[in-house]
Image: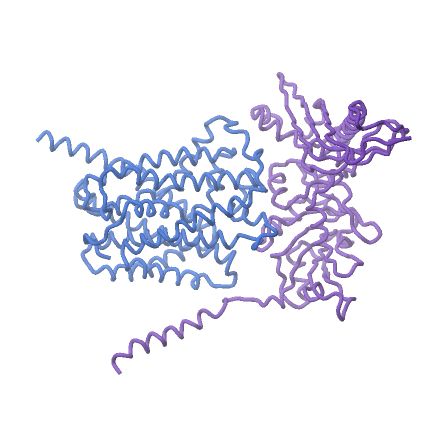
Amino acid sequence: MTSGPLDRITSYQAVMFITNFILGAGTLTLPRTTTEKINTPDSWIAVIVSGLIISLIAVIILKLCQRYPNETFYQFNQKLLGKWVGLLLSLTVICYYIVLSAYEVRTMAETTRLFLLQGTPTWAIIMPFLWIGLYLVQGGVNAIARLLEIIFPITVLLFLLVMFLGIELFEVDNLRPVLGSGVKPVFKGLTTSSLSFAGFEILLFIYMFMKEKNNITKVPLVGVGIPIIFYTITVVIVIGSISVDAVVSQTWPVLTFIRSFEITGLLFERFDSLILVIWIMQIFASYVIALFIATLGLNQIFPKSTHAFIYSLIPLIYLVSMIPKNINEVFKMAEMIGNLALYLFFIMPLFLFIISKVKERKYEKM
Amino acid sequence: MKKCKPILINSFVSMLLLFLLSGCWSSKSIEDLNIAVGTAVDKSKDGKIRSTLQYVIPKAIGNSNSKSPQQKAYTNVSATGNSLEPIGWETTLQREGPISGAHEKAVIIGQNLAREEPIREITDLFFRDIDIRGSTLIFISKGEAARTLESKEADVVPAIRLVEIAQQDLTTRALKHLSLMKIWGKSNSQTSFLLQLIDIKKGEFELDGAAVIKGRTNKMIGILNKEEIEGINWITGEVNSGAVKAFQKESEKPTYYQIQSIKSKIKPHVTGDRISFDVKIESEGRIAEYWNPHFKPAFKNKTIKHIENAAEKEVMRLVENTTKKMQKEFGVDVGGFGTKLRIKHPNVWKNVKDNWDEKFSEIPITYDVSITIQDYGMIGSKKK
């Protein structure tokens, strides 16, 4: 991975980065996590509203990056916050991405062990995943971008196909009444549904690699817009099919939904493995991007060989991913990551943006 | 020599990789699996639970006409225990091979057990299991559930036949088929609901009405017969085919109206503390059988109107009969009235939902049935 001028990605590839990074491990539990807090069928409204808020933050992040067109977050935060605070922040962010990639890997292993490879030990599922990721990250930002371009259309196609095949189960009554208890419950759910968009902050790190640097407001908008559509479809169809009361009790609501119907007469009767396949691809994308950002950070902070960092991160990620002892601890880990993300990427960019504005004014006065 | 070295190494590594390709870590060969398609759960004589698993024998399905016509397409194993999990392991002591639940089609619960234990608890294993799918259908058996998994006919797997019959939803005299996933939400929100009831007649099973499951206890409290199920289907409009009697006077019989569509709209009204329901039922169809003893020509609209009227009266009788049964005898709402109230008046619903079934039994419901006969088939009139 070189951060030289040769590594350039197009605007479309940047959109792929945002979208694929957002769509990760959280999707399978999304209907439950949002509905738990809201307890009415209005989760989909919360998803849309929080998505719009997130697009706004993503645009702010873009504006922030445009002030430092040839630097990543790891480099320009030192200019804004001073050397030591910036360094500390960078290290926190790197830790966040290491834990995030470990979580992605672990969730993938949990569901694969449950639904696809029942007797396979967890380490045997995780290791090939980690190694292939390592290989890809060595290829740098361009290789990752090309992979994302390949898997995204497959995801869209299969996801929509499977979701709409289950339409037979759909009952509008399960989604009504709309806003029956007013808007208050929707506000309660906004935090959790916003957290499902974690990943939108990726522009902080890849903006440097982008070919076009101006007039690209549509990149964060489209990048967040696609997950909004995905999430809304998921929440609407799953809750509409198995009702609010059932969704809150299901460990993996989306998988429950997919396992609740069979299509006879088609080539395939069951579609669980299809959805798991595209979902594993999405997790892989999230994991690779997180690993990439972590190594990029280490590389930019400590001027050492990139390969050394990638190779040392892999065992670390494996160890972190094995920390949770059971599924409850995995969910707890997700919650922890969410809370950290809330401070790191929802509040901090706004803060940095304000600082940069203030500094700008100071210079103007001088 | 030096030139071909990388090629040699590469091909050696590739050949090693071939071993990794060759199969699954924990594969089980399909011949050894006991593919369970049905489970019957009964109360055993000593008060425990008796569960019967039905395995298909794929060998016997394909070649029934060849050597062994006597061989049945299925085999049942059963054992007794405190709950379903230990029973499952117990059966592995009787028959070789692991149990595979991935093709489970039907769960049948005996009436005796369903009246004593909550449905949600009996079926917990089916919801929790990773292999068993939410699309598995659920039934209650009038008698012993294990007997519904038997058939005298060769080449028939009773559990699969049962599911096929249930899924066709052909007549209003049977309830719309219910999968495990559909009752999970209802059980969790303490809503009362109906489950299809099976009875054994001359050794073969038959769908015969429905079991009433009370929301609060999640236990079976009674039975609705086929005629009362007709009423339910007219109220909910879920099953859209079948026939209905279309004569009132004995001298005019028999005349039958064939249903092509049923549309029903339940409208809740709230004024102050009083809740009431208006149900508007509309149906379109044709005259399917009209012996016509009085030789009235169907070409005349007057005749059509007369028959429509008679059918409307019959439907009215059906729905009112069912309503009386729901409100007065069982005191449960299984017609979906609560759902409509929840949607239209969410704030009122919040106050009444905790004892909705009791409240429901005192709520006035008015019906309005309108039937439209679109045609009368190939015969328009008969001559004396």
For the question of whether residue B273 can be seen, the reply is yes
Residue extending farthest front: B383
Residue extending farthest top: B272
Where is the C terminus of chain A found, in terms of image quarters?
top left
In the figure, what tint was chain B given?
Answer: purple
In the figure, what tint was chain A given?
Answer: blue
How far from the left and from the top, in percent, is residue A361?
A: 15, 30
Is residue B345 or residue A68 the one in the foreground? A68
Residue B212 left/right relative to A344: right
Where is the N terminus of chain A found, in terms of image quarters?
bottom left
The quadrant where residue B150 appears: bottom right
Residue extending farthest left: A366
Looking at the image, residue A361 lies above or below residue A152: above
- Residue at 39% across / 35% down in the picture? A50
Q: How is the image coloured?
A: by chain
Is residue B153 or residue A157 the one in the foreground? A157
For the question of whether residue B112 can be seen, the reply is no
Residue B361 left/right relative to A107: right
The quadrant where residue B115 appears: top right
How far from the left and from the top, in percent, is residue B350?
A: 58, 27
How far from the left and from the top, in percent, is residue A355?
A: 20, 35
Residue B95 left/right relative to B249: left
- Residue at 78% across / 43% down in the picture? B208
Residue A213 left/right relative to B274: left
How far from the left and from the top, in percent, is residue A22?
A: 37, 45
